Amino acid sequence: MSNYTTQHHQNYTRMATETTIFTTLLPDGRSYYAYADLPSEMCMTEEEFKTLWSEHPLEYGKVMNHGKVHDTPRWQKSYGLGYYFSGLMHEADPISNDYVKRLLAYVNELTLEKGMFSQKQIDAGAVYNQVLVNWYKDGDHCIGKHSDDEGQLHENTPIYTVSFGQTRDFVVESKKNKKGNEVYRKVIPVKNNTLLIMGGEMQKHYYHSVPRRTTKKVKSPRISITFRCFKHQEVGSKRKRNN
Ligand SMILES: O=C(O)CCC(=O)C(=O)O
């Protein structure tokens, strides 16, 4: 384990072992997603939700598509390390929200306790150090089909999405095979205070999205906090996303 990883973990005091993680192996046999409830002591309170909601940027995020800059249909913000995707650098702020800091520590602890890093990833110093928060006001806010195969990530390290507020559909679907057939599509309703982990080679072989839904049915806000293991570099994305 690298010095960086050791230092990063030395302050952990909580145990994460009580969390039960349900894992689904995907048809390619090399990718999986996993789903779990947060343990009660990690659940976000209504007050914490209000505080984090109040921290969403005033302007929508920006992405580059066909040479033009577009607004994302949600608010988003990078913390910890800058994140280059969809043709633009998304500069990071330091992580200041106490709940987000606590959740980052929990995610690192859970990963170690459940042995979710390979030896190769541990040797490479993989640690969760990048946070992207997405704020969805209602069903009109969404994130399109994409994969997070960017060069900033330690190879094949799992990506965590932790959900708060309104239940939303999280869709996993295979990238088209050579004959153009869609072979896998799964809609996972992601609920308040749950975590979803995308692991193995999922970013290479599958897309994920939180599609737009009618505001008659999806009326309330949702926040997702996503955690990634970045190498300490700020550029080098191959991420494909159209919104
Ligand atoms: O909000 C979510 O659960 C998904 C977020 C996501 O796909 C991303 O940030 O890449």
Image (spheres, helix red, strand yellow):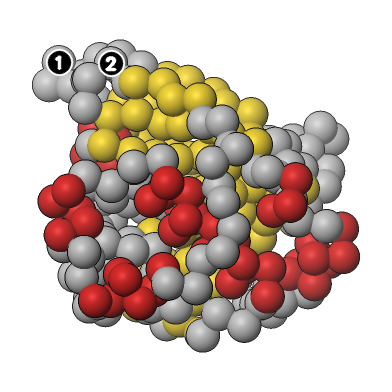
Q: Nearer the viewer, residue 196 or 206?
A: 196
* Residue at disc 1, secondary structure: loop
- Image-based side of 94 in relation to 173, left or right: right
Q: What residue type is labelled 2?
A: Pro
Image coordinates for residue 144, horizontal then vertical, percent: 47, 45
Residue 183 seen from this side: yes
Image coordinates for residue 97, horizontal then vertical, percent: 66, 77
- Image-based side of 144 in relation to 193, left or right: left
Image coordinates for residue 219, horizontal then vertical, percent: 83, 43
User: Crowding at label 2, few (<14), some or many (≥20) Cα neighbours within 10 Å?
Assistant: few
Q: Which of 159 and 73 is in front in this view?
A: 159
What whole-number distance in Å separates the C-alpha atoms at marks 2 and 1? 17 Å
Where does the N terminus fall, quadrant-wise? bottom left
Count the numbered circles shown. Answer: 2
* Residue at disc 2, secondary structure: loop
Q: Mark on residue 207?
A: none
Q: Height in image: 33 above or below 138?
A: above
Residue highlighted by disc 1: 179
Residue highlighted by disc 2: 27
Q: Which residue is drawn at 54% across and 72% down?
A: 77
Q: What residue type is labelled 1?
A: Lys
Image coordinates for residue 110, horizontal then vertical, percent: 48, 49
Q: Which residue is drawn at 15% across and 15% down?
A: 179
Sequence-earlier tag: 2 or 1: 2
